Image (cartoon, rainbow, N blue to C red):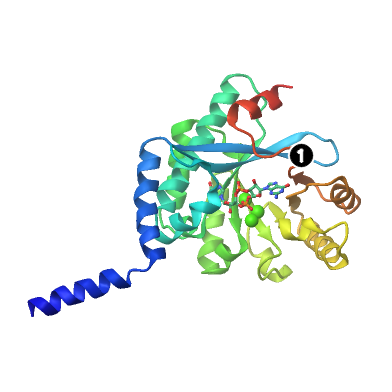
Amino acid sequence: AKAEGRGGFRFFDDSLTASARHRIEMETRLRRAIEAGELELHYQPQVEIASGRIIGAEALVRWRDGERGLVPPDAFIPVAEQTGMIGLLGEWVLREACRQGREWRDAGLAVPRLAVNLSARQLHDESLVERVRAVLDETGYPPDRLELELTESALMHQQERSVRVLRALRRLGLHLAIDDFGTGYSSLAYLRQFPIDVLKIDKRFVDDLAENNDDREIAGAILAMGHALRLSVIAEGVETEAQLAFLRANGCDTYQGYLFSPPLPPAAFARLLAE
Ligand code: C2E
Ligand code: CA
Ligand code: CA
Ligand code: CA
């Protein structure tokens, strides 16, 4: 029996794939990184097309790793989602954005609305609303200056529950945006049941706006749909004047992208605000 047990153990160990091993290792490193204060937020301005003014900023997380330098979120957010670490990480991001926003306000900067990404797993955590309320209380950050970005796919899952949670979040006074819009099932009927404020046109439809007629049709349809529901529409990943010209001509409200600015470290973003 003992030999069998050992064999069984060895079988399990050998079959642990490289990707599973990587996941477990990353989970441990990520937990340590949060505890050691190795995460930081960068802020990407969101610009009102009509006025050219910065009216918001999206907070995007980075990991300052001793060996690897600045690690982009695509390298660790998916692992955080798979392992459940996203709850801890997401709460850190929310608290840090609110803390930073409060600090800037106290320093007299005109801080625009800060947008924070929320993963599907956070949305479906029973305690989300209480956690958000606690962070707002703790940091003294004004709720109407906070926007939470959720993806379409996060809302699709357990729609009725999602609607209840979104209503409760909105009662806290904050704003809600649907991120990566157009990549999922986005009918008007589906959209109108959610109490949201903003639609974000996914970058993949913005990329070829100047050349591809299908993408122009899709972006145009999203703008029409958003405005029919009296939502504000923002385009992400705007890199060229030609893309911006199309968006302006089609009544898009806001844009975000390298054309105006990449995500900036806090000090650089504060300098931009002070200008
Ligand atoms: P996202 O929410 O769609 O964020 C937009 C991404 O597009 C950001 O990448 C941003 O740097 C990039 N971007 C913005 N403008 C341009 C542009 O003009 N051209 C190009 N090529 N890229 C542009 P980033 O910061 O690497 O974030 C990647 C993804 O990681 C985000 O996609 C989001 O899904 C996730 N993420 C980042 N921070 C958080 C977070 O705090 N929580 C959660 N749950 N997810 C996060
Ligand atoms: Ca986002
Ligand atoms: Ca997005
Ligand atoms: Ca994306």
Task: Please tell me which residue is depicted at 69% across the width and 39% down the height of the picture.
Answer: 262
Q: Ligand 4 lies in which image quarter?
A: bottom right
Q: Which quadrant is the N terminus positioned in?
A: bottom left
x, y percent for residue 177: 65, 52
What residue type is disc 1 on?
Val
Q: Is residue 171 above or below residue 263?
A: below
Task: Please tell me which residue is depicted at 58% across the width and 43% down the height of the picture.
Answer: 60
User: 94 and 216: which one is in front?
Assistant: 216
Task: Please tell me which residue is depicted at 46% across the width and 50% down the height of the picture.
Answer: 129
User: 172 and 181: which one is in front?
Assistant: 181
Task: Please tell me which residue is depicted at 34% across the width and 50% down the height of the picture.
Answer: 28
x, y percent for residue 9: 20, 72
User: 172 and 40: which one is in front?
Assistant: 40
Q: Is residue 250 above or below residue 98?
A: below
Q: SS for tag 1?
A: strand
Which residue matches tag 1? 47
Q: Quadrant of residue 222?
A: bottom right
Q: In this rendering, would 222 be left or right of 130?
A: right
